Image: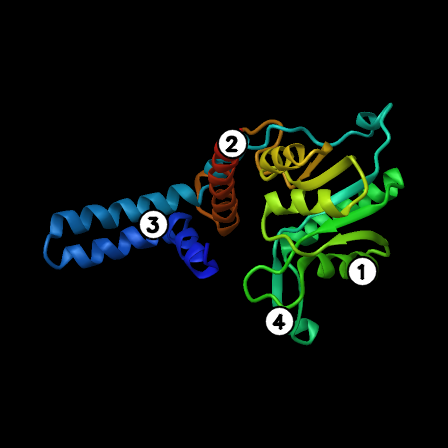
């Protein structure tokens, strides 16, 4: 699929693109069909509010964050070959880093947790991520650079050709000489990541991070007020719901 077409569809389907598109249609229709146009504008405003509420982000995330945090006891009786950290995007031409590419916030969170697990378990690290779009440096290279320069953790293996989670798994299986791994990615992304790596022939031990829903969620008044952080969480959750559905249909 052409990357520009994919990004366009992604923008229009996920918030805030979808409510914005409905609002734009409302403005257009209002010029001729006022009742329809006004209805669409109200729907757009209300949907944006609801999608921006922390309670909405937590509610949607709960359906995805089904795998509990990693516990060292999970390694009992197992010989683990590597900690595999999945890429989560890049930050292109970062001006504060002299215009160089670096890892995105999501990838940085995964690297931090992977470095922590390495120190706790003393298991070596592998990273996986290619160069989607117009990224000049593969994400796997950026991840290795950050781990080694910023966290002081060496990376033994780096896969740099993949463009999605399925390719992360398949390419890693072809290149990395191991079977049992600790798999590091965000909690909402973990279900389809596990599926992809199991289908590739791995025995993955999940190590999810970045939980949005939490073990117990008791909404307060502020959880019904819109926020950009909640909107990002909702967007990510909806994206992962679509991704999980596609992976189950394709691999299930």
Q: On the rendered structure, is 48 left or right of 249?
A: left
Task: Give the quadrant of residue 70.
Answer: top right
SS label for mark 3: helix
Give the CA distance from mark 3 to mark 1: 39 Å
Residue density around tag 3, few if under 14, some if 14–19, many if 20 or more, within 10 Å: many
Residue density around tag 4, few if under 14, some if 14–19, many if 20 or more, within 10 Å: some
Q: Nearer the viewer, mark 3 or mark 4?
A: 4
Residue density around tag 2, few if under 14, some if 14–19, many if 20 or more, within 10 Å: few
Residue position for label 2: 248
Q: Compare residues 38 and 147 and report the one nearer the observer.
A: 147
Residue that extends furthest to the bottom in the rendered view of this protein: 98
Do the numbered discs 1 and 4 sit on residues whose CB atoms are within 8 Å?
A: no
Task: Give the quadrant of residue 187.
Answer: top right
Give whichever of discs 1 and 4 has the lower sequence position.
4
Which percent across, then down, holds residue 205?
74, 31
Residue under the point 87% across and 38% down: 121
Could you say which disc has been placed on residue 150 in the image?
1
Give the CA distance from mark 2 to mark 1: 37 Å
Give whichever of discs 3 and 4 has the lower sequence position.
3
Is residue 220 visible to the viewer in this orientation of the structure?
A: no
Give the CA distance from mark 2 to mark 3: 27 Å
Colouring used for the render: rainbow
Q: Nearer the viewer, mark 4 or mark 2?
A: 2
Give the CA distance from mark 4 to mark 2: 35 Å
Q: Nearer the viewer, mark 2 or mark 3?
A: 2
Q: On the rendered structure, is 4 left or right of 162?
A: left
SS label for mark 2: helix
Residue position for label 3: 19
Is residue 26 visible to the viewer in this orientation of the structure?
A: yes
Do the numbered discs 3 and 1 sit on residues whose CB atoms are within 8 Å?
A: no
Could you say which disc has been placed on residue 93 in the image?
4
SS label for mark 4: strand
């Amino acid at each position: 699929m052409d990357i520009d077409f994919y990004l366009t569809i992604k923008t229009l389907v996920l918030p805030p693109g979808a409510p914005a598109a409905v609002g734009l249609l409302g403005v257009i229709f209002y010029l001729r069909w006022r009742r329809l146009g006004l209805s669409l504008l109200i729907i757009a405003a209300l949907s944006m509010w609801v999608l921006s509420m922390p309670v909405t982000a937590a509610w949607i995330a709960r359906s995805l964050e089904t795998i509990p945090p990693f516990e060292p006891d999970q390694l009992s009786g197992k010989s683990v070959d590597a900690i595999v950290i999945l890429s989560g995007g890049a930050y292109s031409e970062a001006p504060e880093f002299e215009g160089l590419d670096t890892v995105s916030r999501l990838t940085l969170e995964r690297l931090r947790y992977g470095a922590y697990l390495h120190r706790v378990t003393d298991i070596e690290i592998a990273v996986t991520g290619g160069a989607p779009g117009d990224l000049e440096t593969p994400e796997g290279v950026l991840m290795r650079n950050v781990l080694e320069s910023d966290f002081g953790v060496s990376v033994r293996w780096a896969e740099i050709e993949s463009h999605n989670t399925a390719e992360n798994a398949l390419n890693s299986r072809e290149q990395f000489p191991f079977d049992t791994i600790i798999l590091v990615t965000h909690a909402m992304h973990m279900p389809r990541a596990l599926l992809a790596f199991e289908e590739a022939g791995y025995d993955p031990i999940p190590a999810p991070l970045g939980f949005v829903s939490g073990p117990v969620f008791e909404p307060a008044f502020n959880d019904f007020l819109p926020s950009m952080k909640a909107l990002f969480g909702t967007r990510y959750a909806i994206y992962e719901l679509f991704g999980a559905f596609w992976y189950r249909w394709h691999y299930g």
